[in-house]
Image: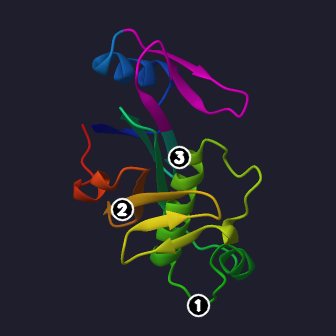
Amino acid sequence: MIKLFLLHKNVYSYQSVLRMVHSIDARGIVIYNKKGQAVIKEADLFLSISHSGQWAVIGIGEEKIGVDIQHYKVKSRDFIEYVTGETGISVPMFSKIWSIKESFVKWLGTGWVGIEPNEIYIDFNLQKVYSKTETAYFITSEIFESYVVCICSELSSILKERIRFE
Protein backbone atom coordinates (compact mmCIF):
# COMPACT_ATOMS: atom_id res chain seq x y z
CA MET A 1 0.00 0.00 0.00
CA ILE A 2 1.37 3.38 -1.03
CA LYS A 3 -0.55 6.57 -0.34
CA LEU A 4 0.45 9.73 -2.18
CA PHE A 5 -0.54 13.25 -1.19
CA LEU A 6 -0.11 16.30 -3.41
CA LEU A 7 0.09 19.66 -1.68
CA HIS A 8 0.52 23.18 -2.97
CA LYS A 9 3.73 24.66 -1.55
CA ASN A 10 1.69 27.25 0.37
CA VAL A 11 0.11 24.53 2.56
CA TYR A 12 3.08 22.15 2.82
CA SER A 13 4.42 22.05 6.39
CA TYR A 14 5.60 19.67 9.10
CA GLN A 15 2.07 19.73 10.53
CA SER A 16 0.54 18.75 7.17
CA VAL A 17 2.94 15.78 6.92
CA LEU A 18 2.07 14.72 10.46
CA ARG A 19 -1.68 14.88 9.69
CA MET A 20 -1.20 12.63 6.68
CA VAL A 21 0.84 10.13 8.66
CA HIS A 22 -1.79 10.12 11.43
CA SER A 23 -4.54 9.49 8.87
CA ILE A 24 -2.84 6.13 8.26
CA ASP A 25 -1.41 5.31 11.71
CA ALA A 26 -2.06 7.53 14.75
CA ARG A 27 1.09 6.24 16.49
CA GLY A 28 3.41 7.72 13.87
CA ILE A 29 5.94 10.34 14.89
CA VAL A 30 7.80 12.18 12.13
CA ILE A 31 11.46 13.00 12.82
CA TYR A 32 14.35 14.04 10.61
CA ASN A 33 17.54 11.95 10.55
CA LYS A 34 21.13 13.21 10.20
CA LYS A 35 20.75 13.38 6.42
CA GLY A 36 17.65 15.59 6.72
CA GLN A 37 15.37 12.77 5.57
CA ALA A 38 11.91 12.59 7.16
CA VAL A 39 11.37 9.27 8.94
CA ILE A 40 8.30 7.85 10.70
CA LYS A 41 8.94 6.42 14.18
CA GLU A 42 6.55 4.27 16.23
CA ALA A 43 4.68 3.02 13.15
CA ASP A 44 5.48 0.44 10.50
CA LEU A 45 5.45 3.02 7.71
CA PHE A 46 7.99 4.62 5.41
CA LEU A 47 7.94 8.24 4.30
CA SER A 48 9.33 10.10 1.30
CA ILE A 49 8.89 13.80 0.53
CA SER A 50 9.70 15.85 -2.56
CA HIS A 51 8.93 19.35 -3.76
CA SER A 52 9.47 21.24 -6.98
CA GLY A 53 8.00 24.46 -8.31
CA GLN A 54 4.56 24.99 -6.77
CA TRP A 55 4.00 21.42 -5.53
CA ALA A 56 5.06 18.94 -2.87
CA VAL A 57 4.46 15.19 -2.95
CA ILE A 58 4.38 13.08 0.19
CA GLY A 59 4.53 9.30 -0.13
CA ILE A 60 3.71 6.97 2.75
CA GLY A 61 4.02 3.23 2.36
CA GLU A 62 4.26 -0.06 4.18
CA GLU A 63 7.49 -0.73 2.30
CA LYS A 64 10.50 1.47 1.70
CA ILE A 65 9.74 3.96 -1.10
CA GLY A 66 11.26 6.98 -2.76
CA VAL A 67 9.10 9.67 -4.35
CA ASP A 68 10.06 12.63 -6.46
CA ILE A 69 8.33 15.42 -8.33
CA GLN A 70 10.06 17.53 -10.96
CA HIS A 71 8.84 20.63 -12.71
CA TYR A 72 9.83 20.73 -16.37
CA LYS A 73 12.64 23.24 -16.29
CA VAL A 74 15.50 23.90 -18.69
CA LYS A 75 18.86 22.81 -17.29
CA SER A 76 22.35 23.53 -18.55
CA ARG A 77 23.74 21.32 -21.29
CA ASP A 78 26.64 20.32 -19.01
CA PHE A 79 24.27 19.23 -16.24
CA ILE A 80 22.11 17.22 -18.66
CA GLU A 81 25.19 15.46 -20.01
CA TYR A 82 26.50 14.84 -16.46
CA VAL A 83 23.21 13.22 -15.42
CA THR A 84 22.38 11.28 -18.61
CA GLY A 85 25.61 10.96 -20.57
CA GLU A 86 23.78 12.48 -23.53
CA THR A 87 22.92 15.85 -25.02
CA GLY A 88 19.90 16.92 -26.98
CA ILE A 89 17.35 15.38 -24.60
CA SER A 90 14.00 17.15 -24.36
CA VAL A 91 13.11 18.99 -21.15
CA PRO A 92 10.27 16.55 -20.28
CA MET A 93 12.51 13.51 -20.90
CA PHE A 94 15.35 14.96 -18.84
CA SER A 95 12.91 15.77 -16.02
CA LYS A 96 11.65 12.18 -16.10
CA ILE A 97 15.19 10.76 -15.95
CA TRP A 98 16.15 13.12 -13.12
CA SER A 99 12.95 12.25 -11.20
CA ILE A 100 13.66 8.52 -11.50
CA LYS A 101 17.22 8.99 -10.25
CA GLU A 102 16.08 11.29 -7.41
CA SER A 103 13.42 8.81 -6.28
CA PHE A 104 16.03 6.03 -6.40
CA VAL A 105 18.47 7.79 -4.06
CA LYS A 106 15.56 8.63 -1.75
CA TRP A 107 14.59 4.96 -1.81
CA LEU A 108 18.19 4.06 -0.96
CA GLY A 109 18.00 6.48 1.97
CA THR A 110 21.40 7.97 1.17
CA GLY A 111 20.55 10.99 -0.91
CA TRP A 112 23.42 11.78 -3.25
CA VAL A 113 26.10 10.80 -0.72
CA GLY A 114 28.52 8.31 -2.26
CA ILE A 115 26.78 8.04 -5.63
CA GLU A 116 26.86 10.15 -8.76
CA PRO A 117 23.90 10.61 -11.13
CA ASN A 118 25.81 8.95 -13.96
CA GLU A 119 26.25 5.82 -11.77
CA ILE A 120 22.49 5.18 -11.79
CA TYR A 121 21.10 3.33 -14.78
CA ILE A 122 17.52 3.14 -16.05
CA ASP A 123 15.88 0.36 -18.03
CA PHE A 124 12.68 1.94 -19.34
CA ASN A 125 11.41 -1.34 -20.85
CA LEU A 126 11.54 -3.23 -17.53
CA GLN A 127 10.89 -0.10 -15.43
CA LYS A 128 14.00 -0.82 -13.36
CA VAL A 129 16.54 1.57 -11.97
CA TYR A 130 19.83 0.34 -10.59
CA SER A 131 23.30 1.15 -9.33
CA LYS A 132 26.27 -1.20 -8.96
CA THR A 133 24.76 -2.71 -5.80
CA GLU A 134 21.00 -2.00 -5.73
CA THR A 135 17.99 -2.49 -8.00
CA ALA A 136 14.48 -1.07 -7.72
CA TYR A 137 11.34 -0.65 -9.82
CA PHE A 138 9.71 2.64 -10.76
CA ILE A 139 6.51 4.14 -12.10
CA THR A 140 6.09 7.67 -13.42
CA SER A 141 3.24 9.95 -14.36
CA GLU A 142 2.95 13.42 -15.84
CA ILE A 143 0.71 15.84 -13.94
CA PHE A 144 -0.46 19.35 -14.83
CA GLU A 145 1.32 19.03 -18.22
CA SER A 146 4.53 20.43 -16.72
CA TYR A 147 5.47 18.08 -13.86
CA VAL A 148 6.53 14.46 -13.58
CA VAL A 149 6.11 12.30 -10.47
CA CYS A 150 8.04 9.09 -9.82
CA ILE A 151 7.73 6.37 -7.18
CA CYS A 152 10.55 3.90 -6.61
CA SER A 153 10.22 0.61 -4.69
CA GLU A 154 12.09 -2.66 -4.34
CA LEU A 155 8.82 -4.53 -4.97
CA SER A 156 7.91 -5.37 -8.55
CA SER A 157 4.24 -5.13 -7.54
CA ILE A 158 4.58 -1.35 -7.91
CA LEU A 159 4.49 -1.89 -11.67
CA LYS A 160 0.79 -2.77 -11.33
CA GLU A 161 0.08 0.54 -9.55
CA ARG A 162 -1.03 3.84 -11.01
CA ILE A 163 -0.01 7.16 -9.50
CA ARG A 164 -3.08 8.55 -7.74
CA PHE A 165 -3.29 11.15 -5.02
CA GLU A 166 -5.39 10.94 -1.87
Q: Quadrant of residue 11?
A: top left
**Residue 72: mark in rendering:** none
**Which residue is painted at 63% across and 88% down in the image?**
87
Q: What is the span of residues highlighted in magenta in the rendered image? A: 27-48
Disc nearest the viewer among 1 and 3? 3
**Which residue is painted at 40% across and 22% down in the image?**
44
Give percent across and percent down for residue 17: 44, 25
**Relative to 154, residue 64 above or below:** above
Mark 1 vs 2, N-terminal side = 1
- Give whichever of 3, 131 is nearer the camera: 131
The residue lying furthest to the bottom in this view is 88
Whether residue 72 is visible to the viewer of this picture, yes or no, is no
**Relative to 112, residue 124 above or below:** below
Q: Which quadrant does the N terminus fall into? A: top left
State left or right for residue 115 relative to residue 135: right
**Residue 107: mark in rendering:** 3
- What kind of element bears circle 2? strand
Residue assigned mark 1? 88
State the CA–CA distance, disc 3 to disc 2: 15 Å
Give percent across and percent down for residue 123: 46, 75
Q: Amino acid at mark 1?
A: Gly
**Which residue is painted at 38% across and 21% down in the image?**
21
State the CA–CA distance, disc 1 to disc 2: 21 Å
**Relative to 73, residue 14 above or below:** above
Residue assigned mark 2? 140
Mark 3 vs 2, N-terminal side = 3
Q: Which quadrant does the C terminus fall into? A: top left
